[in-house]
Image (cartoon, rainbow, N blue to C red):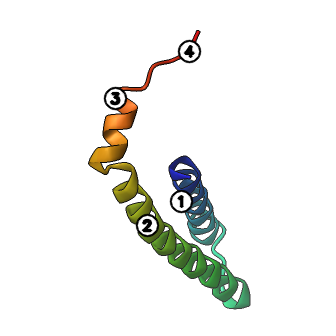
Amino acid sequence: MIQTLLGNFNDYEVHRCKLNFFINELNITGQQLKTLNKLIKKYTKEQEIIKTQFQYKFEKFNQKEFRDILLNFKVMN
């Protein structure tokens, strides 16, 4: 779950960077600019949601009981 959250966060970041690139390099204006800015805002909100989810999941992952289980985990051959 943590890896999925990090991957989704990164995907939104890549999309936001691409949209900013299009805006700057293609000199987009008018309705297209408004639409791209709405998408950037949506992606930013999604990233904020993911940050909250990640924090919750990481706190559970980082609990002493879970760390102890992982440290004592033996791989079966």
The answer to which of 25 and 1 lies nearer the viewer is: 1
Per the image, the residue denoted by label 1 is 9
Q: CA distance from mark 4 to mark 3?
A: 15 Å
Q: CA distance from mark 2 to mark 3?
A: 26 Å
User: Which amino acid is tagged 1?
Assistant: Phe
Per the image, the residue denoted by label 4 is 76
Q: Return the disc, 2 or 1, that comes first in the chain's sequence.
A: 1
Residue at the location (59% across, 52% down)?
4
Q: Nearer the viewer, mark 4 or mark 2?
A: 4
Q: Position of residue 48 (x, y in %)?
A: 46, 73
The dot on residue 38 is none
Residue at the location (32% across, 49% down)?
62
Q: Return the disc, 4 or 1, that comes first in the chain's sequence.
A: 1
Q: CA distance from mark 4 to mark 2?
A: 35 Å
Q: Return the disc, 3 or 1, that comes first in the chain's sequence.
A: 1
SS at badge 3: helix
Disc 2 to disc 3: CB gap under 8 Å: no
Disc 2 to disc 1: CB gap under 8 Å: yes
Q: Return the disc, 4 or 3, that comes first in the chain's sequence.
A: 3
The dot on residue 51 is 2
The answer to which of 49 and 33 lies nearer the viewer is: 49
Q: CA distance from mark 4 to mark 1?
A: 34 Å
Q: Nearer the viewer, mark 2 or mark 3?
A: 3
The answer to which of 48 and 60 lies nearer the viewer is: 60
Q: Return the disc, 4 or 2, that comes first in the chain's sequence.
A: 2
Disc 4 to disc 1: CB gap under 8 Å: no
